Image: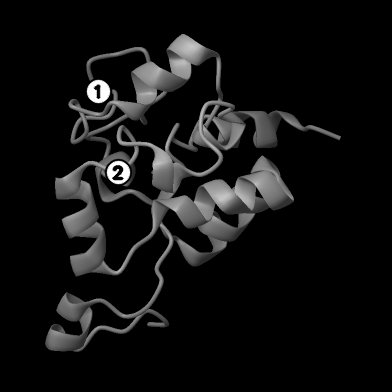
Amino acid sequence: METEQVKKDENLIGYCGIYCGACPSFTSGECESCRAKSEKSAVRYKACKVKPCCIENGFFTCADCTIYASTKECKKYNPLLLKIASWVESTNRSKAIEMIKIKGLAETIAFMDEKQWACFKVKDSFLNKRYGKRMNE
């Protein structure tokens, strides 16, 4: 059964699977999520190609995509600079899309909110190791 809270939280999942509810830009009030219809929408991701693609094709997230079998095949989802940033930070947006496909939005949102992850962490990042912060801290 969908509650008002779950419906509200669905708007905190970005088209690409990022959980805006744990994003520092969102929690500081700088951004209102990528789904907001304001100037404070996706403040750090204005060049995003995923959002317009999902809107144009009627997808709530890339988990609904019928164009590609996997996000790995989509060049809009995987631009080079984002691949590099994901490698440096040891994050994987595709994991959230996979989880949405398997477990649904509500369970993915609950998981991301509990972990307070904006993006799936796949291991301790180079920067975390270097500066002593670990994933489980």
Identity, as a three-letter code, of the amino acid under mark 1: Lys
Q: Percent from the top left, x then y, of residue 94? A: 46, 51
Q: In this view, does 127 lie above or below 102?
A: below
Q: Name the residue tied to disc 2.
A: 78
| C-alpha gap between disc 2 and disc 1 | 24 Å
Q: Count the labels in the image.
A: 2
Q: Residue at the location (41% across, 48% down)?
A: 72
Task: Return the mark for residue 61.
Answer: none
Looking at the picture, which amino acid does disc 2 mark? Answer: Asn
* Quadrant housing residue 40: top left
Position of the N terminus by quadrant: top right
**SS at mark 1 in the image:** loop
Q: Between residues 49 and 117, which one lies in front from this camera angle?
A: 49
Query: What quarter of the picture does the C terminus occupy?
Result: bottom left
**Location of residue 54 with respect to 30 vertically, above or below:** above
Q: Position of residue 130 (x, y in %)?
A: 13, 86
- Say which residue label 1 marks: 40
101 horizontally vs 82: left or right: right
Report whether residue 113 is seen: yes
Residue 72 appears left or right of 68: left
Q: Secondary structure under badge 2?
A: loop
Q: In this view, does 12 lie above or below 38?
A: below
